[in-house]
Amino acid sequence: MYAQMVKTETNTAALTPEERAFQERIDADIKIEPKDWMPEGYRRTLIRQISQHAHSEIVGMLPEGNWLTRAPTLKRKAILLAKVQDEGGHGLYLYGAAETLGISREQMNRQLHAGKAKYSSIFNYPTLTWADVGTIGWLVDGAALMNQVPLQRCSFGPYARAMVRICKEESFHQRQGFDALIQLCSGTPEQKQMAQDALNRWWWPTLMMFGPPDGESVHSAQSMAWRIKFASNDELRQRFVDATVPQAEFLGLTIPDPDLKWNEARGHYDFGDIDWEEFHRVIKGGGPCNRERLRARIKAHEEGAWVREAALVYARKQAARAPAPKKTQTDEILG
Ligand code: BYC
């Protein structure tokens, strides 16, 4: 297994001098930049995580994009359009950050379209009603933020910098989702029921976004040593539950978990068992919308081929026409 191949922090004696110097930089919180030396495992881990993250942003445009033509008001439509465009932008910053590690955008696309690269399990569920759009903003963007705020301190410079802007925008996304739900929950009984139904369907898949339980998380230990990850999957999941329960209470909605209960001794909410079989089924391609999502991405890629070709031809023409660079003062002096 990959996790056994990489050397963990507790195994520093086994590190080469180069690897030890690298780990010391990480421990001193010095950012690693693309041209710096890095262990192959660090590069591969980042390519895996950043490209999966980028794919999640791009595939994540589909479930909400489904409601762009059916948003209930002009205001909600404008907000949703801006949000979906933001997700596209996040995908671009992240593909850009991954490219600095030596993988091309084309390679990443090929991996996604061949079903080899993962994207977040959450985007394989359907958006059945308008309340799903608000619930995605509230829960899914809320969970994404919980996971991504620490990534602003990630040891790899381009990823950390991309996350600063992404988190600002995700924070707006989370608020707009909560705002849409406030409106539904203070509307008619049917509207409130629609919000409750959406919460019932999205709650458990949202908890799965944080990844497998710590005991089964193959990458966590090494990623934490490399400061690519700052908290474990279970820690972040718990933080999310603790933050979200009061929000559901404010909305007057019931979280669909009979075992959810405040635990005074732990100072956290206890919650019920997650259906990990469902999680594994979804990430292996067996979720309700996996096929539909991949089909939509492949179709968009094929239909956009002429745009990429035209942009390349245009860029080549511009480069051929560009005048020779002007001589600088230093050039003049040096002759
Ligand atoms: N879905 O060892 P582990 C967003 C995979 S939000 C699918 O714990 P790691 C957005 C994992 O990749 C969503 N696969 O892994 C929000 C690994 O498989 P591989 C995107 C999952 O990396 C709103 C295996 O399970 N956010 O973009 O230490 C609107 C073992 O897991 C999932 C990010 O990507 C999952 N839920 O921790 C639009 C944040 N969970 O790779 C868009 C950055 C686990 O060995 N990523 N797996 O085949 C991370 O923080 C970490 O990669 C994770 C997983 C916490 C997700």
Image (tube, rainbow, N blue to C red):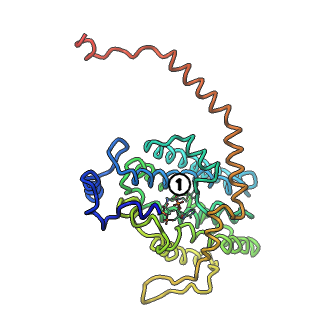
Does 308 appear above or below 332? below
The C terminus is located in which quarter? top left
The x and y percentages for residue 107 are 56, 43
Q: Is residue 29 left or right of residue 117?
A: left
The x and y percentages for residue 75 are 67, 53
Tell me if the residue at label 1 has its CB under 8 Å from ligand 1.
yes
Q: How many marks?
A: 1
The x and y percentages for residue 235 are 45, 73
Q: Which residue is the extreme one toward the top?
A: 335
Q: Residue at x 39, y 53 (%)?
A: 42
Q: Residue at x 43, y 63 (%)?
A: 3
User: Which residue is the site of mark 1?
Assistant: 53
Q: Residue 132 sits in which quadrant?
A: bottom right
Does 249 appear above or below 175? below
Q: Is residue 124 left or right of residue 101?
A: right
Q: Residue at x 58, y 76 (%)?
A: 250
Q: Is residue 170 left or right of residue 198?
A: left
Identity, as a three-letter code, of the amino acid under mark 1: His
Q: Is residue 286 left or right of residue 247?
A: right
Q: Residue 5 sits in which quadrant?
A: bottom left
User: How would you rate the neighbour count of disc 1 (Cα within 10 Å): few for under 14, some for 14-19, many for 20 or more?
Assistant: many
Viewer-side residue, 65 vs 168:
65
Element on which disc 1 rests: helix
The x and y percentages for residue 111 are 59, 48
Viewer-side residue, 88 vs 228:
228
Q: Residue 259 sits in which quadrant?
A: bottom right
Q: Residue at x 29, y 54 (%)?
A: 19
